[in-house]
Amino acid sequence: MLSRLSPLAQRTISPRLLSNAQRTLVNISYPSPKIAVLELDRPPVNSLSLEMSAKIVESIKEIESNPEVQAMVLKSSNPKIFSAGLDITEMNRPTVARLEDFWRNIQTLFLTLYSTRLSTIASIDGHSPAGGCLLAMSCDYRIMSATPSYKIGLNETKLGIAAPYWLKDLFVTTIGYREAEVGLALGKLYSPKEALEIKLVDELVDSPVIDVALKRADEWASIPEKGRVASKVMLRGAMIQDLEEKREMDVGWFRDFIMEEGVQKGIEGYLKNLSKK
Amino acid sequence: MLSRLSPLAQRTISPRLLSNAQRTLVNISYPSPKIAVLELDRPPVNSLSLEMSAKIVESIKEIESNPEVQAMVLKSSNPKIFSAGLDITEMNRPTVARLEDFWRNIQTLFLTLYSTRLSTIASIDGHSPAGGCLLAMSCDYRIMSATPSYKIGLNETKLGIAAPYWLKDLFVTTIGYREAEVGLALGKLYSPKEALEIKLVDELVDSPVIDVALKRADEWASIPEKGRVASKVMLRGAMIQDLEEKREMDVGWFRDFIMEEGVQKGIEGYLKNLSKK
Amino acid sequence: MLSRLSPLAQRTISPRLLSNAQRTLVNISYPSPKIAVLELDRPPVNSLSLEMSAKIVESIKEIESNPEVQAMVLKSSNPKIFSAGLDITEMNRPTVARLEDFWRNIQTLFLTLYSTRLSTIASIDGHSPAGGCLLAMSCDYRIMSATPSYKIGLNETKLGIAAPYWLKDLFVTTIGYREAEVGLALGKLYSPKEALEIKLVDELVDSPVIDVALKRADEWASIPEKGRVASKVMLRGAMIQDLEEKREMDVGWFRDFIMEEGVQKGIEGYLKNLSKK
């Protein structure tokens, strides 16, 4: 699989033998002065722990701080998984304080990525369920590998939980109200072809996706920043302001949902099944 | 035509020789513990009178009261008409009190069907204009017969009236703003193929539709209830709350529109034409 | 090219030898008692100056004042350009008073065309960028020439500026949130075929477009007015009221954006380039 990756992807891929403690969780590179690549690198599946979310936010701010940089490509170090979403161990018998803090970091991750002045291109080379789909939808443009076995979507209901209201809003703005209604209710995971049809992704290419993602980043980076950012703020400002105002309400909703005994038992069973595999 | 109906459809079909007074207006059956079938049975065309609306609401509540039931299929006893919509005789020189009460029952029908915790599957085996389209759009999923002569849509403007604001909102969330704008203005009735293209229905099958509807009901019933209902409330809650707050304003709008002499003359002419046929 | 125009188009076309001062900016004709044709006639490219906007508004009001007229076709006297959008000389080192007044007239043009009781059909026979696209989207129905070289869209960001918030809203209701997001960010100009795919236009026909536009005007004019207008108000009322309340805020936003030295330099350079050609 690695041999199929482009030179850039090979250059930014992380050494697989490091322990997680030694890893930096993400890698930043600059293929050209206007373009940054933010590579998610938390094996095995780039799941979003509190620390991983905080690290991504910190990295976006670092990239933003250079006024020359206009576009950012978001990719994965794993050639088959973009991100598997929330780290479920964060939700397994947590303390209330840690759980609330975890969720605040997920909110901040969304708010930071969704509102950045940078043009953001998701290079989705692999599975992208739940929180992985959230990361992709928070970008400005999505390119996915056409590999038919890959899946993307919000499958929360299948796990017995529900997406938060702002992720529902993001889903609606991306694929339209009607498709979002069915997709959320059934917890649908879409193939790349289905995802393209409902415009959950904008483009399909053969793996590796990164070369096309860098080309698109160049195109987005060529648009004068002032008008482009003004348009982005006009479109995304209302949703951002709404969540800013309701953050603690949303934290309470998440905490109460997850701490319920029925949901906790479901998570326990899910993790036991995983460890048996 | 009857011979083409599936066994379930034959079992729940009503004796055609009963007078309307003797009929129960709807029939409820349970093909499996998790699935209910609500059959509209007000010949000749399942038009929505005050009593018919009240009866459907009562039936949904009865089905909801059994916690085991997860999904409900809505169908018609008429093999060629799902529902012709509002009973126009309710609007022909009515008393103000009856007309207002009629409209309150239509509102309650929408609110009850649109917000039920049950997954709702519309099995649309025939024409479904105006109020028939309202019933279908209030469900979670719509399957229509592919028979090309059948029609579905909101044709109110062609009759000289207008859909209420909440039906307009429902139309917009179902098929999108732009298509709703044209469809409402022109009072368009869509063929099954056109309806599928604009996502007014989700699936086309050859008649009888009921077998596929029961299959989909099984799929929807397999999703854990808690997350599924939380998602439904998040998506539909705002529209429901809005109408709850504006019910009497909406009753006044409908009453004033219908009681106008020009509209009354139009309805009179329409009914005279019908009785000549 | 002229020989390909329909008889009506030939009849309403303006004499090309008149100076702009002698021209009336628009021409009104009535091919039938229920149908008006409003022809934009400000050579070379029907750009929207303060006077042109005011003249279009005055003409719509004149047409509306005849209760018999039900539909209006909006077309161009130029066989290759519908309208090139805002007159950029209005934004080149203007006085603040003139610039603000210019923008108020653009707002009024949008509000008048978007909310008229008339059914409005855009007959788009040529290029239609930026303000030209605004005119088209403010109508009820859009027919465009299939000529592949023609372009339509909101290309403001490519010129270093941004569309106002209400034009962004109009774009979203017309083509959906997701497509609007990409189209605005990149300042995309769509070919007729692309415009049809995203429903930015409703229909493509070979030039001349006017014959089909008049046919559609007949169809829209046949719908009873009362219900049709009630539906239009229900769908468009909120956006109209919103801008009515925020007009001066929007004038301030436009003025501050345009008067910025960087934007002024950009406009100067753009006009110098034009004059060299």
Image (cartoon, coloured by chain):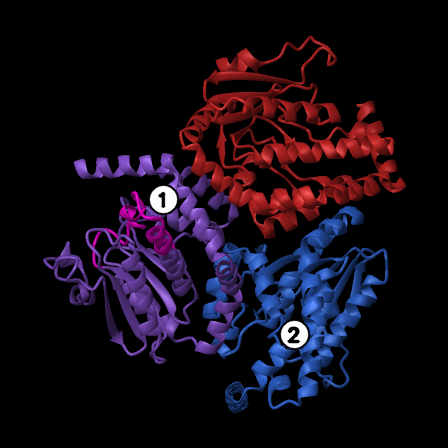
Chain colours: A blue, B purple, C red
Q: How crowded is mark 1: few (under 14 residues within 10 Å), some or many (20 or more)?
A: many
- Front-lying residue, B213 or A41: B213
Q: Name the residue under label 2.
A: A249
Position in image of residue A2 (x %, y %): 64, 70
- Hey, which quadrant is residue B162 in on the image? top left
- Front-lying residue, C271 or A209: C271
Mark identifier at residue B255: none
Label 1 is placed on what type of residue? Tyr
Q: Mark 1 points at which residue?
A: B190
Segment tinted magenta in the rendering: B77-103
- Front-lying residue, B96 or B269: B96
- Identify the residue shown where x is 56% and y is 40%: C200
Residue farthest toward the right in the current orientation of the protein: C261
Q: Mark 2 lies on which chain?
A: A
Asked whether residue B215 is in view, the answer is no
Q: What whole-number distance in Å separates the C-alpha atoms at marks 1 and 2?
A: 43 Å
Q: Mark 1 lies on which chain?
A: B
Position in image of residue B226 (x %, y %): 47, 78
- Front-lying residue, C227 or C155: C227
